[in-house]
């Protein structure tokens, strides 16, 4: 599912996220790097938190937008907070549609910089 290299801390924290939220589905908007990934529980819903030790940014589904950033698109929130990146505008718009469809209010990271896992939650 995920590759953490030799980072056992990120692997253990990601395992804790999957178990705590009872995540069943790993979903993607695009493949490769960068790609937007999100996870759903058995009811096909985003996880609902919080979970102790999480590193999350607030999201407002009504105001997220995409901007070109070099060779990719950055999905931003509140004008400056980075939420995700996508390789092109089409996939960035699809990611925004996912955020809005599921009502994501948090963009979460396991490890920063270069998180081993990213997920959306309510």
Image (cartoon, rainbow, N blue to C red):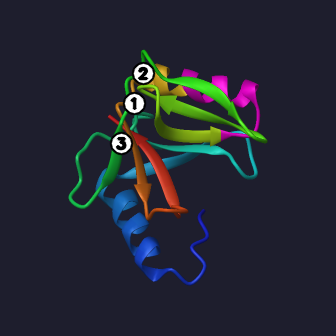
* Disc 3/disc 1 C-alpha distance (Å): 11 Å
Q: Which mark is residue 104?
A: 1
What secondary structure do most residues of the magenta stretch adopt?
helix
Which secondary structure, mark 3?
A: strand
* Disc 3/disc 2 C-alpha distance (Å): 12 Å
Residue 58 is drawn in which quadrant? top left
Q: How many discs mark residues in the rendered view?
A: 3
Q: Quadrant of the N terminus?
A: bottom right
Q: Would you call the spot at circle 2 few (<14 residues within 10 Å), some (14-19), or many (20 or more)?
A: some
At x 46%, y 26%, the residue is: 79
Q: Is residue 22 among the parts visible in the rendering? A: yes
Q: Nearer the viewer, residue 19 or 105?
A: 105
At x 37%, y 24%, the residue is: 60
The residue to which callout 3 is attached is 57
Instruction: Give the magenta part as a residue range.
Output: 86-97
The residue to which callout 2 is attached is 61
Question: On the picture, is 44 further left or further right than 5?
Answer: left
Image coordinates for residue 72, horizontal then vertical, percent: 73, 39
Residue 14 is drawn in which quadrant? bottom left
């Amino acid at each position: 599912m995920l590759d953490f290299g030799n980072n056992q801390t990120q692997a253990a924290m990601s395992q804790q996220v999957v178990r705590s939220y009872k995540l069943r589905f790993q979903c993607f908007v695009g493949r490769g790097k960068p790609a937007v990934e999100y996870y759903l529980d058995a009811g096909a819903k985003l996880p609902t938190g919080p979970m102790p030790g999480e590193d999350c940014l607030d999201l407002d589904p009504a105001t997220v937008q995409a901007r070109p950033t070099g060779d990719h698109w950055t999905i931003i929130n509140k004008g400056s907070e980075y939420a995700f990146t996508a390789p092109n505008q089409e996939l960035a718009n699809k990611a925004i549609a996912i955020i809005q469809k599921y009502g994501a209010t948090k963009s979460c990271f396991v490890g920063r910089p270069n998180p081993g896992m990213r997920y959306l939650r309510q």
